[in-house]
Image (tube, rainbow, N blue to C red):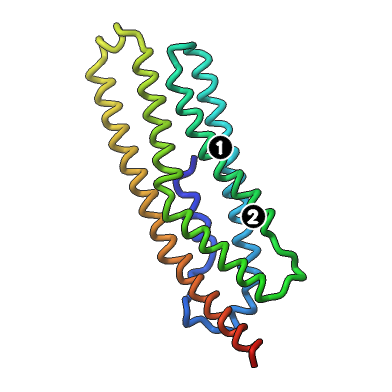
Amino acid sequence: MNWNDYEAIWKRQELPVGAGADLASLKATFETKHRKLAATLFIRDIAEAAAGVLVAGAISFMWWKQGTTGWPLSIALVLILGVTGVFIKERLRTHRQRLGAEAPMLARLEAEIAELQHQRRLLLRVRTWYLLPCAAVILIVLATVLRNAPAEALADHWPIIGGFFGAYLVLLCFLFWLAWRINRQAVRKQIEPRLAELETLRRELLTSSET
């Protein structure tokens, strides 16, 4: 799976100005930015779901090759399918909540605000539902491989094997921390300013409808 998928979504869009954005510009670019966000989220969900299925297939094959001694891989399989299920659920949710072009501007604006708020929560919780399960999958696979490796090979090459896995785990921790940090930055620099823009536009539309 791609650690930077969420960052890529927001990097494809211009940096939002925030609450001080020009209202006329916000109205003029709303539909374009909505379609761009919808398209990038679609690509993210499909790509991540497909990657999850491929990883699940690889784990299943490994489990089959190792036989009953590879039973811990069943836990890894459940975890990776759980992560995959999140992206499938995202696609189904988006499809159910999609509004047509004939919907009023205010309704489409509120739907966009709700979607960005949802994506914000998803990013802020990425450690819980994405990073930790993926880390657990990797550790389970590594532990299972070591557990079922020939004892003689481990004894003869233990310093090399231990050094390799130690370095790999350090690198893995760094990559997970980096992914967590990137997602936090995406929320702060992209989602929250864009939400401020849309909230400003929403207030303007509500004020206009009351006068």
Q: Is 76 left, or right, of 100 in this rendering?
A: left
Residue pushed farthest front? Answer: 210
Q: Amino acid at mark 1?
A: Ala
> Which badge, 1 or 2, is on the more N-terminal residue?
1
Disc 1 vs disc 2: Cβ atoms closer than 8 Å? no
Residue shown at the point (46%, 49%) measured from the top left = 4
| Nearer mark to the viewer, of 1 and 2 | 2
Residue at 61 percent across and 44 percent down: it is: 88
| Residue found at the far top of this picture | 152
Residue 112's quadrant in the figure?
bottom right
Q: Residue furthest right?
A: 102
**Which residue, given by chain and number where applicable, does mark 2 sit on?**
94
Q: Residues within 10 Å of mark 2 (few under 14, many from 20)?
A: some
Residue 206 sits in which quadrant?
bottom right
Q: How many marks?
A: 2
The residue carrying mark 1 is 51
User: Which sits in the foreground, 75 or 60?
Assistant: 75
Distance of label 1 from label 2 (alpha carbons): 20 Å
163 left or right, relative to 80: left
- Name the residue: 25% across, 22% down: 162
Residue positioned 63% across, 52% down in the render: 93
Which quarter of the rendering shows the C terminus? Answer: bottom right
Q: Secondary structure at mark 2?
A: helix
Please name the amino acid that badge 2 sits on. Thr
* Image x and y of residue 99, in percent: 71, 64
Q: Position of residue 124 (x, y in %)?
A: 42, 55
